[in-house]
Amino acid sequence: MIRRDEFENGVVVYRSSLIEDFCGDVVVHGFSTRLSGLSPRKLFPEKEEQGEVYCGGDYEGLDLGVEGEAKYTSANWRKLRKVMGMRRMVRREVRQVHGGEVKTWSSESELVKLCHAPEADGMVSGNQGEILAIRTADCGSVLLVGKDGHGDVVIGALHAGWRSVVAGVVEKTVKEMVEMGVDVGGVVGAVGPCIGVGAFEVGEEVVSDFRNVGLEDCVVRGGGMMKPHIDLRGAIARQLEEAGVSNSRIDVCDVCTFERADEFYSYRRSVGRNGLGGCGRMAAVIGKK
């Protein structure tokens, strides 16, 4: 079950009971929302003062992305990390490119700023004291945990928009965990909030890509919809199962980021529908203590 937890400071995080039951206090994890953040409604006022034409974005709240003002996003990260007990942990990220590459962080991996991080959409780590962080605003996110032959926990996190799903990032991330000695039959996964099927209208080229990777059943037509729609969370869950993860060990959040403007950022809503210049990002985070 995916549970919605609200902390005393107003921060809201969605968490998986399956991951908690599997790892106990060894792993901390969650899917953030936009609630109770520090980013203001109006960013970059200096642009207007300088006479620039600026199309504002939807960043108000707990924006954890890279488009908003850094002083606010940095403070938002600190607020989230504190309430989740991650304050002293190292944050690992990759430059997400909507592809299928996976980065494995070893104990010898250097600490790098995001601008110098490798391009990938999946991450795996067995290191203590590290957080894996994925940023999203409609795309799916998946958090994974498993144990190797010595009983040590291995964690994974991946960014699963439709392009990454087609590129195989789900299967490749699970495979990287298996190569680290994890028994795939024991892997637990949680799929976070993402755009729902009712809001995810696509063109026939996307349908073709889904058909080519065996996900035609995740294409929805009819029901008053003029164009095909994609069941993204269903596609992700399907690929987790195909990678060897048991259905009974997969938690799926059924909340739609597009429809819930009060709680989530949505690129398709803010930029695609409303014509804004950008939007904030939520984060899916998982860390090994």
Image: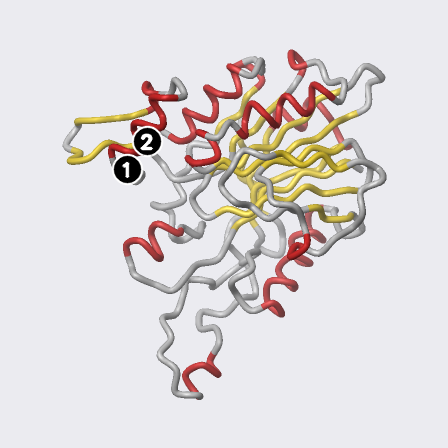
Q: Give the total number of marks visible in the rendering.
A: 2
Spot occupied by residue 23 in the image (x, y as percentages of width and height): 73, 26
Image height of 138 relative to 183, above or below: below
Spot occupied by residue 246 in the image (x, y as percentages of width and height): 56, 13
Determine the residue positioned at 36% across, 26% down.
210
Residue underneath mark 2: 230
Quarter of the rendering containing residue 189: top right
Image height of 87 relative to 231, above or below: below
Label 1: element kind:
loop
Determine the residue positioned at 73% across, 18% down.
182
Determine the residue positioned at 56% across, 29% down.
190
Residue 202: mark in rendering:
1
Q: Are marks 2 and 1 in contact (CB under 8 Å)?
A: yes
Quarter of the rendering containing residue 130: top right
Q: Residues within 10 Å of mark 1 (few under 14, many from 20)?
A: few
Label 2: element kind:
strand
Image height of 135 relative to 125, above or below: below
Spot occupied by residue 119 in the image (x, y as percentages of width and height): 60, 45
Q: Amino acid at mark 2?
A: Ile
Q: Residues within 10 Å of mark 2 (few under 14, many from 20)?
A: many
Residue 9: mark in rendering:
none
Determine the residue positioned at 64% across, 42% down.
285
Spot occupied by residue 65 in the image (x, y as percentages of width and height): 55, 56
Query: Which of the pair 33/168 is nearer the observer?
Result: 168
Return the disc, 2 or 1, that comes first in the chain's sequence: 1
> How far apart in space, not on screen, are marks 2 and 1 (Cα)?
7 Å
Q: Quadrant of the C terminus?
A: top right
Query: Which of the pair 101/199 is nearer the observer?
Result: 101
Q: Amino acid at mark 1?
A: Val
